[in-house]
Amino acid sequence: MVEFFDSRQIDIASSGLEAQTLTIADTKAVGANVECRKVLVKAESGKTVYIGDSDVDDNYPPLPNDTYLELTVSNTKYLNFYGNDGDKVFLIVLP
């Protein structure tokens, strides 16, 4: 069991979902190469992470870290995140 979004317990293996934890390194993180149709994503609690692969405009809000954001994407390799080294981004991949 994994405690993930909204303090709910999710059994990833039995649900057929895949979880990814990305760690920001050199201010960037990229999703693994996994085909999907949607991804649930959130930042580590208390951390500020943005979607993108470089400096972002302050007018764009950061990823939520208290709930999830649902993104439609065909492969997690297209997801780029920008933040401070060591910060984490959590993904649940929906096949």
Image (cartoon, grey):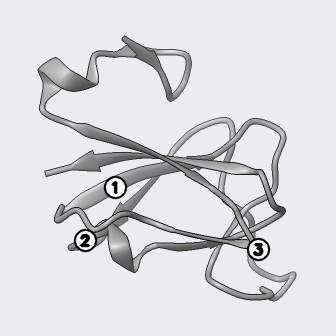
Identify the mark at residue 75; answer none if there is no mark. Answer: 2
Q: CA distance from mark 1 to mark 3?
A: 23 Å
Q: Nearer the viewer, mark 3 or mark 2?
A: 3
Q: Residue at x 50, y 26 (%)?
A: 4
Q: CA distance from mark 3 to mark 2?
A: 22 Å
Q: Residue at x 43, y 18 (%)?
A: 2
Please identify the quarter of the rendering in which residue 63 is found.
bottom right
Q: Position of residue 13 (x, y in %)?
A: 19, 23
How crowded pointer 3 is (Cα within 10 Å; few <14, some 14-19, many 20+) is rated as few
Relative placement, left or right, of 9 versus 62 is: left
Q: CA distance from mark 1 to mark 2?
A: 9 Å
Question: Mark 1 = which residue?
Answer: 39
Does dot 2 land on a helix, a strand or a loop?
Answer: loop
Identify the mark at residue 23; answer none if there is no mark. Answer: none
Q: Residue at x 81, y 48 (%)?
A: 47
Which badge, 3 or 2, is on the more N-terminal residue? 3
Q: Position of residue 37 (x, y in %)?
A: 18, 63
